[in-house]
Image (cartoon, grey):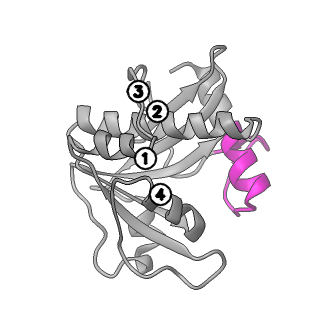
């Protein structure tokens, strides 16, 4: 993945998570949202437009090392968060603010489809994540096998932890709800590449 795409992704993450949502998280040089989990072990799924501009992205974290759910939000889980070599945590799911509603929906669907294809191509059977309650409800409605890991927090917008099971049946489940579109996965470089 090019440096330009990385810069564009980190800039958009700042616009979404810091400027729009008001999260109190690190910002590098006043432009880039980068935290301690953006290291050599992070994997990024990025959707770009025809000019190579960032439209949407997600960061995947290994769960056999420190990740957000086990270090920051373990209280959202009734039990120990799922972890292991076949489990990844989806974080920083980000859609570009400049996109119109129809483009945002198409980008979201492409990004979800790419996450599923990436999992199937790489032996990942489970995704975990944390989402605000309204977003969690949308994720449940996608039609895939998604379960809460505990009760939502009562603070703020109500955060929920979840697990999403990925299997060869997942594309069909997402296709039924109009979400899955086959993607030709390209350029899934690690952060260090």
Dot placed on the residue nearer the N-terminal end, 4 or 2: 4
* Cα separation between marks 4 and 3: 23 Å
Q: Secondary structure at mark 4?
A: helix
Q: Which residues are magenta?
A: 10-33
Q: Residues within 10 Å of mark 2 (few under 14, many from 20)?
A: some
- Where is residue 57? Give x, y as percent: 55, 38
Q: Earlier in the sequence, mark 4 or mark 3?
A: 4
Q: Quadrant of residue 174?
A: top left
112 to the left or right of 20: left
Q: Residue at x 48, y 64 (%)?
A: 130
The residue furthest bottom is 154
Q: Is residue 102 left or right of residue 37?
A: right
Looking at the image, is mark 1 or mark 2 earlier in the sequence?
1
The quadrant of the image that shows the C terminus is: top left
Whether residue 16 appears in magenta in the rendering, the answer is: yes
Q: Nearer the viewer, residue 172 or 21?
A: 172
- Tell me the SS state at disc 1: loop
Of badges 4 and 3, nearer the viewer stands 4
Q: Are marks 1 and 2 in contact (CB under 8 Å)?
A: no
Q: Which residue is mark 2?
A: 191
Instruction: Establish if 100 lies above or below 78.
Output: above
On the image, the x and y values in percent for residue 50 come to 63, 14
| Residue linked to disc 4 | 139
Q: Which mark is residue 188?
A: 3
Q: CA distance from mark 4 to mark 2?
A: 26 Å
C-alpha span from label 1 to label 3: 26 Å
Label drawn at residue 105:
none
- Residue 149 vs residue 6: left or right? left
| C-alpha separation, residue under disc 1 versus residue under disc 2 | 32 Å
């Amino acid at each position: 993945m090019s440096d330009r795409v990385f810069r564009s992704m980190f800039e958009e993450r700042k616009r979404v998570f810091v400027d729009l949502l008001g999260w109190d998280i690190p910002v590098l040089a006043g432009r880039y949202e980068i935290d301690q989990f953006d290291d050599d072990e992070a994997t990024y799924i990025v959707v770009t437009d025809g000019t190579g501009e960032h439209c949407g992205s997600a960061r995947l974290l290994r769960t056999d090392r420190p990740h957000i759910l086990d270090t920051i939000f373990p209280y959202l889980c009734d039990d120990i968060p799922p972890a292991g070599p076949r489990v990844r945590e989806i974080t920083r799911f980000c859609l570009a603010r400049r996109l119109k509603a129809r483009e945002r929906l198409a980008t979201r669907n492409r990004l979800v489809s790419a996450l599923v294809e990436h999992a199937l191509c790489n032996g990942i059977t489970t995704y975990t994540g944390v989402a605000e309650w309204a977003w969690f409800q949308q994720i449940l409605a996608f039609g895939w096998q998604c379960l809460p890991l505990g009760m939502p927090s009562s603070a703020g917008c109500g955060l929920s932890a979840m697990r999403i099971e990925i299997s060869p049946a997942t594309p069909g489940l997402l296709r039924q709800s109009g979400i899955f579109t086959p993607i030709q996965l390209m350029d899934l470089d690690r952060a260090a590449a």
